[in-house]
Amino acid sequence: MTTVNLKCHCGGVTGHATDVTPSSGNRVVCCCCDCQAFAVHTGREGDTLDQFGGTEIFQMSQSQLTIDKGQDKLQSMRLTRKGMLRWYTSCCNTPVGNTMNAKMPFVGVIHSFMDIADRDSVLGPVRAFVQTQYAKGEPDYPQHCAKFPLGITVRIARKLMVWKLQGKHKPSVFFGDDDRPMVKPIIADGIGKS
Ligand SMILES: [Zn+2]
Ligand SMILES: [Zn+2]
């Protein structure tokens, strides 16, 4: 079990994620328009997106993540009114992660917030490259799939169920005891294609 250090680009927000192993979460690259639009919104698409517009995330339970410094610098936004809550830092606009709501136990932590020299050794290989129909150019990912391949969908669903049963949606750095986001999300209607 490894503790992964978390850090925004400027160091204003730091934290850590506990009990991280390749099997403990889901490492995926998502090429969907919303993930791309979010990166553009933060102005950090250059160091968030790969050459095909993919965003690498590691899905873990919310309770694994702790913010040690700069909790007040966590900001949230939604691309659409019902879209995912996308978290970033106000100090330097580092994309942090994606959540649905307080009841869904996961957070998809974006690689830009993980302070790991060698992600392959800590997080294991990328398990799926998804939504590649929205990728830029002709992606040469090792294996890729439009939408979500069944294998990773089942894996994610199973993890969500276990985390939920274990109560791992709490404590959360993103949602308060009343299940509301810690900060009111900005709604960025009109960004991207959604
Ligand atoms: Zn920062
Ligand atoms: Zn996406």
Image: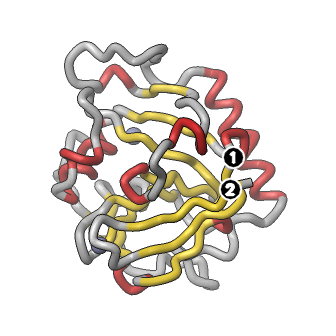
On screen, residue 193 versus residue 131, left or right, reads left
Looking at the image, which residue is at 61% across and 74% down? 172
Instruction: Check disc 2 and report its element: helix, strand or loop.
Output: strand
Question: Is 156 left or right of 39, judged from the image as shown?
Answer: right
* C-beta proximity under 8 Å, tags 1 and 2: yes
**Looking at the rendering, which quadrant does residue 146 occupy?**
top left
State which image quarter holds ligand 2.
Answer: top left
Residue 33 placed where, x, y %? 28, 37
Residue at x 48% of width, y 65% of height: 6
- The residue nearer to you, when weighing 193 against 38, is 38
Neighbourhood count class around disc 1 (C-alpha, 10 Å): few under 14, some 14–19, many 20 upward: some
Mark 1 residue type = Thr
- In the picture, measured across the screen, residue 110 lies left or right of residue 189, that is right
Mark 2: which amino acid? Answer: Thr
**Residue holding disc 1:** 21
Give the CA separation, mark 1 to mark 2: 6 Å
User: Farthest right residue?
Assistant: 165
Residue linked to disc 2: 2
Relative side of 106 to 10, left or right: right
Q: Which of marks 1 and 2 is nearer the N terminus?
A: 2
What residue sits 61% from the left and 56% below the top?
106
